[in-house]
Amino acid sequence: MRAAALYSAAGSLLLTTLAAAPATGTTAVPGVRAAESTGTALAAAHARAKGITFGKCPDAQDLPGTMECGTVSVPLDYAHPDGTQIKLTVSRAHATHKDPHNSKRRVPRQGSLVYNPGGPGASGLYFPLIGMLPEWKRIASAYDLVGYAPRGVDKSAPLSCEDPKHFFKAPSLSPTYPSESYKKERVAEAKAYARGCAKRSGSKLRFYTSLNNARDLDVLRAALGEDRLTFMGASYGTYFGALYATMFPTHVRRMVFDSAVNPDPEQIWYRNNLDQSAAFEGRWTDFREWIAKHDDVYGLGDTADKVLANYRKAEARLAEKPAGGKVGPAQLQGAILSAGYYDDYWPHSAAALSAYLKGDPKPLIQQAGPTPGAAVEAENENAVYTAVECNDAAWPTDWQTWDRDNTRLARVAPFETWDNVWMNLPCAYWPAPRQEPLDVRTGPGELPPVLIMAAERDAATPYDGALELQRRLSGSVLVTERDAGTHGIAGGSNKCVNGYLDAYLLEGRLPERRAACAPHQEPKPSPARAGRK
């Protein structure tokens, strides 16, 4: 399920030592092998004894604020905890103890708040810097803010499936209704990509899973010296966070699930991607309706249908002559898809489309064109995304199933359907063994109350996922941002949402079962500025 690294929460942008472990720390969980549970306990005990030696972050010299980095070792295979180890890179900013509303008050520390931004494949290494934003200062006063790069990501034993030099394939097409010959080309590419993952990663490939991400989180908890985990996961981070809650409920202090993935085992991951494609059609409509309301600024039409016609016009032009030789229909679709995640992208995305149709391609090239310097990071993120989702569950292995399901879906949701197929199709030909998805579920009293947050019109993680997660985690509370669709709402621009977040993390207070907030304000339109950097 493709989910961009969390933006708006960045400003609108593990087991204790065996002797001290809770008695239920290694209780058998259906679907989890005993050897891996024992291996996690051993790895966590070792991590607690060793701790993390923090020092300067090599890539953060020019960044504001104070952030330190270190590493924690985790087993590649938890069934063999003394075997091959990989190092996860961890970042931290200490609690400031400063009350932003009362300079004379010293705020007591509440421990570490560990964050994951989703993906799979996104890095949270720069998360500690978020404490400098006004919306996060209260939380930063009480918590050490801890980010990390999950296994396979960035500097944490990075995974690769192809030469990064060949990752950006631009300009490229993005047919809404692909021909049979085009489909055959993409099937061949998916098979080649899957083979590349196996070739470049070998026998290690099978160990990049959501279950292992959850186990790594418990080792990190222990390495930080925390008896119980305070965790905030966004998007995909909610899924392995939910796995953690199921496997290690006695290790949980507080958990925030922001923009929740549907954890139903039947949904992981093929059906979740179908639901995501369907939801993006509604979000694409929201964006077009907003553009139409501001036709005086953009001149793209005063109805959503007229805006769509102009979008199709731009697609056709780019197919015939790519902008700057590097922006074709697929790059345009990718830029507009980002606006489907975050509505604060709407003004500059609409401005770029408008400028292009009026003869100025520069804003569109700047937004949608590939950035060669980002190729290594983008290839790595894509490799981890693919490996985790393909390893996590069974996928249809016959092309006919994919073709049938998505041909039907594209009739009513053409915007994202086929591009989502090409993103995930390597899973049909995956060379590594598949996991059986864990049945996320906790009974009354097994898990401390947790907070789920979701926007009602979120397309990347449709709202039904938040409802399903609440049904499965007993005692959990759901806060909904009504009539809004930004992906990732915690710590963003909605003061009501942030009030619930602060009350929970700082005081442990939650509303009764469910609460709702009015939507944040829509973005204000802004025209394009040619050549803007």
Image (cartoon, rainbow, N blue to C red):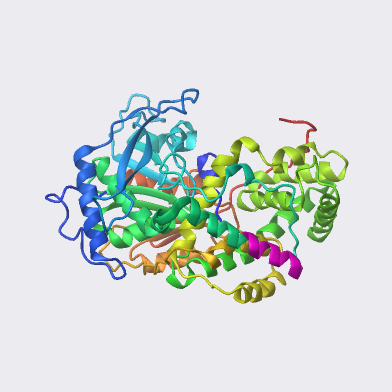
Magenta stretch: give its range.
177-189
Q: Is residue 415 left or right of residue 359?
A: left
x and y percent of residue 500 in the render?
Answer: 43, 49
Left or right: where 209 falls relative to 193: left
Q: Position of residue 182 (x, y in %)?
A: 74, 64
With 350 as the anchor, is 80 left or right in this view?
Answer: left
Please state, as top left, top right, bottom left or bottom right, where the C terminus lies in the image. Answer: top right
- Answer whether residue 242 is magenta in the image: no
Of 524 and 336, nearer the camera is 336
* Left or right: residue 307 compared with residue 83: right
Outermost residue, left side: 19
For the question of whether residue 191 can be seen, the reply is yes
| Vertical comparison of 287 with 463: above or below | above
| Percent x, y of residue 259 | 49, 55
Which quadrant holds the N terminus? bottom right
Magenta residues: mostly which secondary structure?
Answer: helix
Is residue 6 in sight in this rendering?
A: no
Q: Position of residue 135 (x, y in %)?
A: 48, 38
**Residue at the (43%, 27%) spot, across then down:** 58
Q: Quadrant of residue 473?
A: bottom left
